[in-house]
Amino acid sequence: MTMGLFKADFYRFFALGFAGGALLVLGVLGLDSHATLANNIVPPAHAEAAH
């Protein structure tokens, strides 16, 4: 048995975790929503009226 830095299981679990996280994010944000991610997190900025 050869020793390696990362085993095949690491890559498999990393890929499954990445795919699961991506599905979770898409499920929370909604695939059909037309709002961007930035609009959901940060409110739009408004300039102060000049005096």
Image: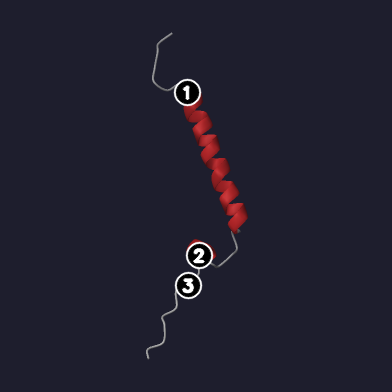
> Where residue 4 sits: x, y (%)?
39, 17
Q: Of marks 2 and 3, which one's residue comes earlier in the chain?
A: 2
Question: In which quadrant is the N terminus drawn?
Answer: top left
The number of numbered discs placed on residues in the rendered structure image is: 3
Name above or below for residue 51 compared with residue 16.
below
- Tell whether 4 sits left or right of 18: left
Please report the residue visible at 37 percent of the width from the left and 89 percent of the height from the top: 50
1 or 3: mark nearer the eye: 3
Tag shown at residue 44: 3
Q: What element carries label 2?
A: loop
The residue labelled by disc 1 is 8
Res. 7 image quadrant: top left
Q: Where is residue 16 in the image (x, y as percent from the top left)?
A: 55, 35
Residue occupying image coordinates x 59% and y 65%: 33
| On screen, residue 35 above or below 46 | above
Q: In which quarter of the image is residue 17?
A: top right
Cα distance between the residues tagged 1 and 2: 36 Å
Task: Point out the residue furthest to the top here.
Answer: 1
Q: Which amino acid does label 2 sit on?
A: Thr
The front one of 42 and 29 is 42
Residue annotated with mark 2: 36
Q: Contact (CB < 8 A) between labels 1 and 2?
A: no
